[in-house]
Image (cartoon, helix red, strand yellow):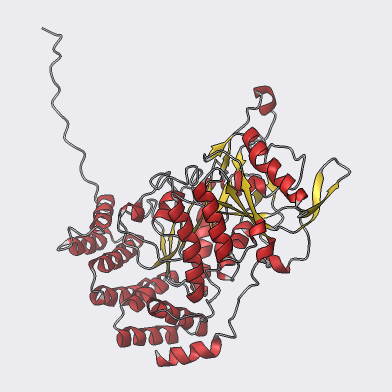
Amino acid sequence: MKYLSILLLVLSSVWSIAKPSIDPTSIAILYNSNMKESSELAFYYAKQRNIPLDNLVGLDTPNSGHISREQYQKTIEGPLRRHFSHNRWWKLQKTSDGFIIPTDSKIRLLVCVYGVPFGIQQVAIPKEESDKLHIIERSNKAAVDSELSTFGVQNLPLKGAVPNPYFKQNTSFPNDKKFIPYVMVGRIDGPSPEIAKRLIDDAIATEKQGLWGMCYLDQALKGANYQIGDDWLENIYQFNWEKGIPTVIDRNKQTYLTNYPMRDAALYYGWYTSHKNGFLLDPEFRFKRGAVAMHLHSFSASNLRNLKTNWVGPILNAGAAATVGNVYEPYLDLTHHFDILNERLIEGYTFIEAATMSIPAFSWMNVSIGDPLYQPFKHISSSGEVAEEDKTYRAISLAFRAWKDDDEKISRRLQTAAIQKNDARFYEVLGLWKLSKKDNKGALSFFYPALSKYPDASDKIRTTLHLANLFRSEGQKAQAVDALESIVIGNENEPAAKAVKAMLNILNPPPPPAAQPRKPDSTQK
């Protein structure tokens, strides 16, 4: 561990990936002037991020999540355009094809806070016209945030989506000298004003030391038509291990099982199913402070201020600091591409830059919730304040980056750390790493020490679930069942035992209930 610490100091400057921050004077904060909590949050965020108070814009808009197109135009889009013109925040020009577009703008990022509506409802299209349109063009509903990205371009048709010129880019926005007539739009929101405020506090606190911990992925395995979503998660899996971020991937058709005992969950990407389940059903579960977590579903953000339904609200309620979602049906290709978002975050971009680079279109269904300026991985180079709870993951990250071409040295160094620190997480991570390299035998050689060294039942159960999944992948059902049945003994009352029992029911489905004797028909004599 001493050697790792010395190497950390030597290499931290070499691996520095810090990106330029977004100029606070180029940010405008939008709040609902009819809601005290909304204005208070706007002023609080401005103070925390040194955004000029002149850049706050109060909107006389309804206190509801979803509004009509007419309400959006009258209470958000129209007033905002007039505010930009009155304050000379932009220069406008009429094009030869009839559009009015900004040719320059002081504001490059809009931040909607709690209280600002998030959904624009569909305007009915006559059937004879709708039948002639592509399925994408039939939709004129949108997330408020995505619609605001194009608010500077006047006279745009309502139907369909607008291609996002930032999609797949890899240039920091402060360094991009090209002017594009669209803006980035983020949102600080959630099930309550208190949760929304926490997103700000957690982002700022985490930036001091960086985000360290585990990543959990949950593939859906829904077939060829949905393969792209699973491919995104597979890309994250490979990328994270290359960057020294230990990652668990669930390749089963089911989502993570009820009360799955995640530990130190700093990143989570999953899909599919309508409402929260799996680990989020455990009332004691909390993400690590500053966590970035998201679950792909068509309506994941349709009720983002409800902490019990869909996914965005429950994820934020469980402690995540940032997430993305869809207010209405976006279709898979037009959702956030999770692999791009994950890569840009780890490369050091702000949350809003990463989210914007990962979305193919504007004027569509998508929202990005969390402090837009949050840079969770600005210290992945091992800089920043060193918190006690992060030391294990800092050492793991350092080992994988320093000796990425020397598997034997990684194993030896981290095994030594496990012994010296008496920390079973090193063994578990080594087992997961071996799984990523398709070395099941090597994975077993580390999972068993982790199982014996972990003192807590939840950690033992999680390690056993790793073992069971390994056995399942090899067709060794009996060994999987034996491992699961053994760990349940003495841990029946542990919340995580539900995950074990759920897997046992998958491997050995209980028999259907016995048929009830048919009661005689009382109408017959």
Identify which residue, 410 or 394, lies in the foreground: 394
- Residue located farthest toward the left when viewing the structure as drawn: 525
Residue positioned 13% across, 26% down in the render: 517
Q: Quadrant of residue 275?
A: top left
Left or right: residue 492 versus residue 313 is: left
Residue positioned 49% across, 73% down in the render: 210
Residue 56 lies, in percent from the top left, at 63, 54
> Does residue 219 appear in this view?
no
- Residue located farthest toward the top when viewing the structure as drawn: 525
Left or right: residue 160 versus residue 476 is: right
Identify which residue, 358 or 388, lies in the foreground: 388
Residue 309 lies, in percent from the top left, at 40, 44
Residue positioned 33% across, 65% down in the render: 466
Above or below residue 417? Residue 425 is above
Above or below residue 496? Residue 509 is above
Identify which residue, 523 or 122, lies in the foreground: 122
Residue positioned 24% across, 63% down in the render: 479
Residue 394 lies, in percent from the top left, at 45, 79
Q: Quadrant of the C terminus?
A: top left
Q: Quadrant of the N terminus?
A: bottom left
Residue 63 lies, in percent from the top left, at 52, 40
